[in-house]
Image (tube, coloured by chain):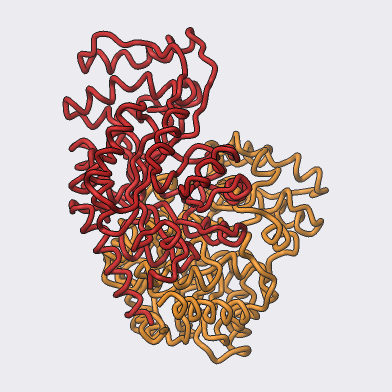
Chain colours: A red, B orange
Amino acid sequence: MWKNSVFTSMAGIDYPIVQAGMAGGVTTPELVAAVSSAGGLGTLGAGYMNAESMEKSIQKIKSLTSATFGVNLFIPEYPEIDQEELQKASKKLNSYREELGIERSELPSNTTSSFKSQLELVLKYRVPVCSFTFGVPDKEVVQELKREDILVIGTATTVQEAVVNEENGVDVIVAQGSEAGGHRGSFLSAFDKAMIGTISLVPQVVDEVNVPVIAAGGIMDGRGLLAACALGAQGVQMGTAFVTSLESGAKEPHKQAILHTTEEKTVITSAFSGKPARGIENQFIRNMKSYEGDLPAYPLQNSLTKDIRKEAANQNKPEYMSLWSGQSPRLSQQLSASAIVEKAVAEAEQLMKRLS
Amino acid sequence: MWKNSVFTSMAGIDYPIVQAGMAGGVTTPELVAAVSSAGGLGTLGAGYMNAESMEKSIQKIKSLTSATFGVNLFIPEYPEIDQEELQKASKKLNSYREELGIERSELPSNTTSSFKSQLELVLKYRVPVCSFTFGVPDKEVVQELKREDILVIGTATTVQEAVVNEENGVDVIVAQGSEAGGHRGSFLSAFDKAMIGTISLVPQVVDEVNVPVIAAGGIMDGRGLLAACALGAQGVQMGTAFVTSLESGAKEPHKQAILHTTEEKTVITSAFSGKPARGIENQFIRNMKSYEGDLPAYPLQNSLTKDIRKEAANQNKPEYMSLWSGQSPRLSQQLSASAIVEKAVAEAEQLMKRLS
């Protein structure tokens, strides 16, 4: 049944399962390679990486697999820096730093982005697939990548965002439903207008664009895979399902939190990064809730909370970590990434037989 | 493929498509009969009906079709009445009344419910299916219905609510995802904790209960039908899809609003009834937003706004009407109810062939 997918032939993969390019250390080269070797599309979440670590990761992935893989990049944002605002925002975090024994923290002094050098690496290594989040790459960037036979994937959370992606020339669009864990990809609409459930978003996007659509948000297994295909998607992107995989670089408290929570426990918060994201509610989110409207913009707030998130993970304190998760945590499993891919494919195939 | 559905044989229908029991005049006997005659399950939304009009409607449905149909009832709520609070809340509505030329409005003096007489009618006419929203019927009620061979359907918006439905003995559970239009069925969780997308909710519910599950929320066509079956549901409940049908009793401005809006335009509001519900954002919702935390409980606020909603519909002023809609309005069509059922079934069957 997978041969009918336009997306699998475009991407040169066996099964239309994309491992989401989650940033922040989750997507180890081992995870990316395992997904790709199993016939899916592993994706390095390079959004927060500097050129050096991104290059090392690409080299490592290439040493581990000869299969197609991808890199995910963040369209950069450059909010104005107001030192006074940053100082005020940083003060709100000092009680956490004290509790964690963090002695000294630095304010971000500029909003640099590695985007340009990241793109150069994608071109240099001719990474087979390059996906983007938080916006649409310029037409020139898209064309440059396509000239090198690099498949370009955009992200949309509304029909309008999908249309703009198509206008800018992307090959494939990930439609991210409201169930998705981690950061919302919204870039045209206010995030709260763009919380459309996957089962609503996918067919409405499919009807309006001519490029293949990949469904994301709440999909964890073969049931979600077949459902996405029924909705008109050419495949799925799964994030949370791979966070708890054996090869994932997610911290152990993060994995355990997903494995033991329920569908009612995730919330949308901007407290960690200044940008709305779905994660398991904890003390930090609850405490910061009253400041939500008043935080520095992404990526400034992300820089401010970095020391806290890191040290909390070191000290096994999930209450101060960003525990990104989608709305289907009850379906999470501790398996190898290849087993997750293979089980999903086998389950979808069995389901097809049972239904027909 | 529909013969595999446990639900269709339990309900005695050909296709696992339930027309949601939307209250407020949408579910005319003609609509209910048309859906049932086409092989689906038409449902009279009797939640707000008094015994007399409910009985008339049941008689009319029976005169129009010999097929299986259902009735939907609301589990009653009896909030305390505080005349001062009601007067204050009613004042907030006076500017709308003035604009609409409504001269005199009465405050609700008690919170009666027709629930008991509604149940008696279901038993008297042995309505084949009885579904419930806003809570779970007592075990005794469930048993009484089952003794008369009436199929009992409950509504859940979380796994926990589904488990409680099963414990109370219901035969089938509708899992209502966050995409759904109209009132949220949540009764255990705060509504904002229970906004789980259909693609997440359905498989997580299916894994935890042993009774058949029907998927609701965002489903409008054969793609949604097949997707729901893939997720482990035994069928779908569609509401918005039938609001715009030819037999629907929805006011014309309501139908037109759905037909011409987009997925970004619906919001959750308590302004019309005191209970969270999804509808197309309009002036009334925007104006009332700041009072949301401070409104009389359902069904008191519903009584207070009744004159406004009614008169606004008469005057073709959609800005003051409750324009309930799910998150897939782009998929709405002006067709007969039977065409909606038949198209969905045919599309799902074609999709199955194409995917396999």
Q: Quadrant of the N terminus of chain B?
A: bottom left
Residue B149: quadrant of the picture: bottom left
Out of B303 and A200, give the one closest to the viewer.
A200
Measured along the vertical axis of the image, is residue B333 above or below residue A218? below
Q: Is residue B5 left or right of residue A254?
A: right
Out of A177 and B200, give the one closest to the viewer.
A177
- Disc tally is 0
Measured along the vertical axis of the image, is residue B325 above or below residue A273? below
Asked whether the viewer can see residue B160, the reply is yes
Q: Is residue B142 left or right of residue B198?
A: left
Determine the residue positioned at 53% across, 89% down.
B67
Out of A156 and B328, give the one closest to the viewer.
A156
Out of A206 and A34, give the one closest to the viewer.
A34
Q: Quadrant of the C terminus of chain B?
A: bottom left
Determine the residue positioned at 37% across, 49% down.
B189
Determine the residue positioned at 18% across, 26% down.
A314
Asked whether the viewer can see residue B46, the reply is no
Q: Position of residue B152 (x, y in %)?
A: 39, 75
Q: Is residue B242 left or right of residue A243?
A: right
Q: Position of residue A260 (x, y in %)?
A: 21, 47
